[in-house]
Amino acid sequence: MKKKSHRPFYMLLILVLLLAACSGNSESGETENSGGEMTEEDKQGGTLIYGRGADSVGLDPINVTDGESIRVTHNVFETLLEYDHNLELQPKLATEYSSSEDGLTWTFQLREGVKFHDGTDFNADAVVFNFERWMDNENPYHQGDFPYYPFLYGGFKGDENHLIEHVVATGEHELEIKLKRKTAPFLSYLAISMFGIASPAAIEQYGAELNEHPVGTGPFMFEEWSRNSTITLAKNPDYWMEGKPYLDKLIYQVIPENSARLNALQTGEIDVLDGMNAGDTNFVEETQGLELQKRPSFNIGYMAFNMEKEPFDDPLVRKAINMAINKEEIVDAFYNGMADPATSPLPPSLWSYDDTLEKYDYNVEEAKKLLAEAGYENGFETELYTMSNPRPYLPEPMKIAEAIQSDLAEIGITAEIVSTEWATYLDDTKSGKHTMAMYGWTGVMADPDNFLYPNLSKTNAEVPAQNIAFYKSDEFTSLITEARETLDQDKRTELYKEAQQLFQEDAPWVMLAYTTPPLAQSDYVEDYKPHPMSNDLMTDVYLSNQ
């Protein structure tokens, strides 16, 4: 019998050893370490598909306030400053800043060597161009509502309370912003995604159509938008952070149903899932190849009354409904341990949150008494608006609305549920079509001003209103305005706590939940870190299955 030769085996072994030696000695000098981490070169490439429940409303950051738009624009545009995952302010397009002794004049040193996606230079003149567009409603490129600007900066240029004296370039990469009055959260304003710096050349070219042709300095460039389906971003090859981003493409895919989105994750149609039924978190944790992520809690979920419509102009009715809704049961049923019943319009993680607020306990009999005292002993008929897609603060909006509907029936209130898709829902509620509406808010800056002023100030109760309760308390607005203009944080805390107590007494909302929103991803998605503000940057994300 012929003896079997081992030569092929040895040759194969030698080849394997040679390849192993070569792989640890690349031209760049980077090697795979003993922990098996990928090299910078290995991380490059691939397409990540991010599954979500609804489309963006728009892609011009100054004209949007919704989270589905911000999660896209935040990867295309950059702000002067930004919040890190610990909610601390960090440099971005501005590398340094200083202020005058009186706190009114601010000087910023801008990052050099940065270009917009269209190849034009980022500099101080570009920032001035953007501010002039935002603050001057006579500017030819001031096209849209610019909703965030007036309630942060006290109106537009020429208005009595407009905050800004001037914005001027004092050098190619130096900027001066002079304020008319002290404003405690001013630096935070500069980190809000809505104030992403756009290319002046693109603004001049596209005008109002910048909404569909966004051009910033961010890690990804806009490529294509198929409405209610996908938004495709491509890697910015000239990004100022060397070697970043790693991904070639980033696609935001709309899949309205939570269960369909989870199935798409399982089958590999998408790589990351945002918005899921709370009951599916256990399934994700137990499924091989999937990983559960948790977004740090920085949100509030609530139901707003339209206080301009009867009978919700009566505080007795609002308090009765607050007592009629079993918030603890709703949280237990629909959040799977990832939420707590809410009391304040501020999240517990934010300074000046008042943990002494007396909550509205679930009490059907007391609710009936208050309703009778208001003249509605036999109840009444109304509508309850809810969005059709999941939100971080409302993972199953229709089911939660149905639970509220059932609770209201116990005190004689018949509520018809009205559900629409996200963009329509925002239009309807901001125009005041609703009587009651499910809503919520994820903070975009780590300051109480961001939760209270947009959503509850009298200033923002005019159509199109962000204050969809149309809560027009002069006292409340005065308190939060004074807090905004006070630099002493202890004094600000006192003012905000007083405002929270007034909110609780006036009851413009039914507070529902503070949530820790669950997300899911395939296990080959690396370094995806959900941000508390939901404006996830994908600069560092890479795919280990390339």
Image: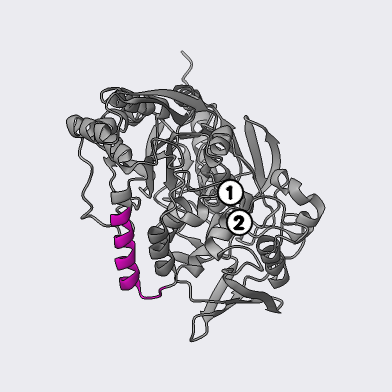
Viewer-proximal residue, 129 or 296? 129
Would you say 500 lies left or right of 186 here?
left
Q: Hey, what amino acid is under mark 1?
A: Tyr
In magenta, the rendered stretch is: 486-502
**Residue 233 quadrant:** top right
Percent across and percent down for residue 371 are 27, 33
* Secondary structure beneath label 2: loop
Q: Hey, what amino acid is under mark 2?
A: Gly
Would you say 168 lies left or right of 452 here?
right
Residue 418 shown in magenta: no
Determine whether 128 is above or below 23 in the image. below
The numbered mark at residue 246 is: 1
Q: Residue at x 34, y 30 (%)?
A: 278
Percent across and percent down for residue 129 are 72, 66
For the residues labelled 2 and 1, say whether their Cβ atoms are less than 8 Å apart: yes
Residue hosting label 2: 243
The colouring scheme, among rainbow, by chain, secondary structure or one colour, is one colour
**Residue 437 quadrant:** top left
